[in-house]
Image (cartoon, helix red, strand yellow):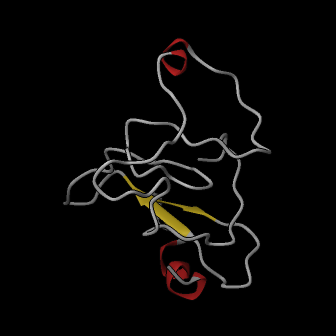
Amino acid sequence: MPRSEAQSMANDPNFKILEWDSEDDLVVVFTKTADSLPITGFKVEDKPCMDPTRLSYSEAQVFYPLEDDATRSVCNLEDNTSLVHDPRYTKSGFSVDEFTV
């Protein structure tokens, strides 16, 4: 959401606002007290695979593979769409580290 809209929640302890430098002036706002469905998954990826069971790795990504990662393979051609990466996602231009998320 725009940073200007998030300012009204800045002093509310129920909301967590993640900010970073951006030309778009956007922030991410989280809460644990909203009367709605929870976030059940949150992926931070460079180019998500069409097949959600596969992992997408950025060439510049530094990671420590876990046991589960060894059984998964990287993106490949998806049978139904003939696409490797999901075109519904676009780069936002934001940068955030995994610790902050």
Q: Is residue 43 above or below residue 69?
A: below
Residue at 51% x, 42% y is: 75
Residue at 55% x, 84% y is: 2
Closest to the observer, 63 or 40: 63
Residue at 49% x, 48% y is: 43
Closest to the observer, 72 or 20: 72
Q: How many marks?
A: 0
Q: Position of residue 83 (x, y in %)?
A: 43, 58
Residue 60 placement, left or right of 56: right
Occupied quadrant, residue 24: bottom right
Q: Position of residue 30 (x, y in %)?
A: 44, 59
Q: Position of residue 49 (x, y in %)?
A: 47, 49
Q: Is residue 25 above or below residue 97?
A: below
Residue 59 placement, left or right of 69: right
Closest to the observer, 90 or 10: 90
Residue 55 placement, left or right of 51: right
Residue 43 placement, left or right of 51: right
Residue at 42% x, 69% y is: 88
Q: Position of residue 7 (x, y in %)?
A: 56, 80
Occupied quadrant, residue 54: top left
Residue placed furthest toward the top: 67
